[in-house]
Structure formats: C-alpha cells, structure tokens
Image (tube, rainbow, N blue to C red):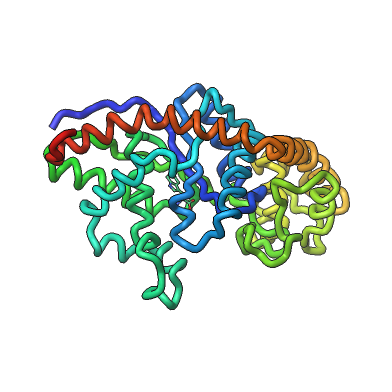
C-alpha cells in the first residue's frame, strides 16, 4: 500500500445541549480560534445528531444550536475563515455513520467508557443512538478526511476508535482512503475546574451556578463569581510545585494562565506569594476584560436568529462540498451501484 499524504485539516464538534462555560471557552473555543488563525483549514460542527442520543426538547435544541453558533463567533471564529455548521444539515455524516456501523465491532463499542457512564445503571433503556454515538463521531471526522481533531481528554477513547475504524476500513477494502487522525488532546493543566470544588470539572450541569462562569454571564456576575470562588487560607505558593495539593489555588492560577496566554511558571513568577485578596481582583479584572465582550457579542448575535441560520446554512453548503465527493468515493469502494 502506498502512503497517501493528506492535507492538514482540523475538525471538531461540540454538542448543542445548552450552557457554554469558561471551560468550553478555554478548553475548546479559544483553541479552535487559534487553529483558524494559523491558516489551517478548520471545520467546526454543532453536533445536533449527537445531542439527540439523549432526550432534547425541540425548542431548546433549536435555541442551544443557535446559541452555540453565537458562542463560536463571539469567541473569535470567523464564519468566512472557518466552516461553521450544524451536523444535521449535512446528511453525509449520517450516511457515513451507517457504513461505519457495519465496520465497527460490537466488542469495540461495548468497551466505550462514555457509553457506560452516560447509560448508567439502566443501559437497557439507553437509545441505540447513544451506543452508536462513537461511529457517528468517526463519520464526522472522516467524512472530511480530517487529520487533526482537538478535543478534551474524555474524548481520547472515541478518537482511538476513529483510528480503528479507519484502519479496518482501509484494510478490509485494500485501500489507503481514510487518514489515521491525530488527536490533539487538551492538557490536564488547562482543564477548568469548578469554582466551588477544585477537584470537579466546571460543568453546566452543576446545581450551583456559582461553580461556573457561563459564556452568557455579564461583567458583574463574572467578577462576583471570581470574588466568591473557594480558596484555602494560605497565600499563593511561591512556585508551581506548591500548587500540587491545592486544587482551588491551582485552578484559579490555571484560569489566569490560560486567559493571559502564559505558562503557569510565568504566572507564578508574577503572582507567587500574594494573598488571595490581592490575586482575586487581578483575576477578576482579566476575566471580565476577556469574557464580558464575548457574552455581549453573543447576546447581540442572538437578537438576529435568521442571520445565525444563514451562517449555518452557508457553512453546511461548504461542508457538503467537501463531504459529498468523499462519501461518493466511499460508496464506490464498497460496491454501491450508482455511486
Ligand atoms: N463527542 C464530542 C464531545 O462530547 C463531540 C463530538 C462529536 C466531536 N463529533 C465530534 C468532537 C467529532 C470531535 C470530533 O465532546
């Protein structure tokens, strides 16, 4: 088999299941914008077909999809430079997913830890779509021959499955058609934790709104949440090593580092030894300066949903132009008449 060189192409997806947080911004959206600004081809998808693997109220799903699109744009994604669209508008995703359902093995799918976590005790009552979720995710990526996929640590296993599906397809049909995608995993250091408990991930589903900064929070709310964030009684340590057993201090320092595009060592050189009463106002100012314009831009964009719909439809057209020939070629390879 000859090695085919695939042009670099970044793809990633976020579920429109409502509620974007600072964690989504620093872990995903900000990185997505960076990739875009490096001049690489970037495709970002609101994965509504994935969202419905668990129940979604139709009106809320529509709203969450538009709000996610507004969040992308407010975070610096330019719908001219990147392709922004919602998954269901490009039927090729679902079509390739079916083929991958026939490539992936039951044994592979049963090992997926996210299914086990999400299905919980009552797996018999989970949707078949939730079980097949990773095959659709593989289709999302491979229908564009994407080479790089930025995701959080929790998606690592799904990306390994994507590589397994590509490898088995290429092997079964004796082709070098699908690329073996590189995961670009977000480091644990940039994971944003709850403002109330430094050992838990910041989450839109935490019952306490004080545990997170929402992308829709205004300046006063952001500042208040930082001011009230849980800390310990000691001042900040003098260097990064001193953060090891201090999850809340580490989280706030990580947030500061990510917002200011510095390493934790750089931040500690600047702020090490300071009391929280000194550090928190500095962090609050920085968070407000960066996040308040995003929430303002999101609410401005949400006032004109038809403009958002137009952006998504345009993105879908551009996405389809890439996906359709790849799906057609896939059909040819597997022996579908008429492809
Ligand atoms: N499963 C991803 C998540 O929950 C979302 C997703 C769907 C995705 N399809 C994708 C991410 C393709 C990267 C590439 O975070």
Query: Which residue appears at 19% of the width and 47% of the height?
Result: 168
Q: Nearer the viewer, residue 35 or 268?
A: 35
Write the residue at 15% across / 28% down. Answer: 2
User: Measured from the top left, where is residue 253 in percent x and y?
Assistant: 71, 48
Q: Position of residue 144 (x, y in %)?
A: 35, 34
Residue shown at 68%/54% (left/top)? 250
Residue 66 x/y as whole percent: 60, 42
- The image quadrant that residue 259 belongs to is top right
- Image side of residue 35 versus residue 25, left or right: left
Quadrant of res 270:
top right
> In the visual, does 245 lie left or right of 32?
right
* On screen, residue 12 above or below 118: above
Q: Position of residue 320 (x, y in %)?
A: 38, 31
State the quadrant of the C terminus: top left
Residue occupying the far bottom of the picture: 121
**Which is more toward the observer, 123 or 94?**
94
């Amino acid at each position: 088999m000859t090695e085919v060189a695939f042009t670099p192409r970044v793809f990633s997806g976020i579920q429109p299941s409502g509620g974007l947080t600072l964690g989504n911004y620093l872990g995903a959206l900000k990185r997505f914008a960076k990739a875009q600004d490096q001049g690489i081809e970037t495709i970002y998808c609101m994965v509504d077909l994935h969202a419905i693997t668990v129940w979604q109220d139709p009106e809320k799903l529509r709203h969450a999809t538009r709000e996610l699109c507004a969040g992308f744009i407010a975070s610096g994604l330019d719908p001219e430079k990147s392709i922004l669209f919602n998954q269901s508008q490009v039927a090729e995703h679902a079509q390739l997913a079916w083929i991958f359902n026939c490539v992936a093995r039951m044994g592979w799918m049963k090992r997926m830890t996210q299914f086990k976590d999400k299905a919980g005790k009552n797996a018999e009552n989970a949707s078949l779509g939730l079980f097949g979720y990773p095959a659709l995710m593989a289709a999302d990526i491979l229908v564009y021959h994407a080479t790089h996929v930025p995701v959080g640590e929790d998606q690592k296993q799904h990306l390994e499955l994507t590589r397994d599906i590509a490898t088995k397809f290429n092997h079964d049909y004796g082709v070098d058609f699908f690329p073996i995608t590189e995961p670009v995993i977000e480091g644990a250091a940039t994971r944003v934790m709850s403002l109330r408990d430094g050992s838990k991930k910041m989450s839109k589903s935490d019952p306490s709104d004080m545990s997170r900064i929402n992308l829709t929070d205004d300046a006063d709310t952001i500042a208040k949440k930082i001011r009230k964030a849980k800390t310990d009684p000691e001042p900040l340590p003098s260097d990064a090593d001193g953060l090891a057993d201090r999850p809340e201090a580490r989280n706030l320092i990580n947030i500061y580092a990510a917002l200011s595009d510095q390493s934790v060592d750089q931040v500690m050189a600047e702020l090490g030894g300071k009391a929280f009463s000194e550090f928190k106002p500095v962090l609050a100012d920085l968070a407000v300066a960066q996040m308040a314009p995003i929430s303002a831009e999101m609410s401005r964009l949400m006032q004109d949903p038809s403009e958002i719909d137009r952006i998504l439809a345009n993105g879908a057209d551009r996405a389809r132009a890439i996906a359709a020939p790849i799906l057609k070629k896939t059909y040819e390879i597997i022996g579908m008449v008429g492809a």
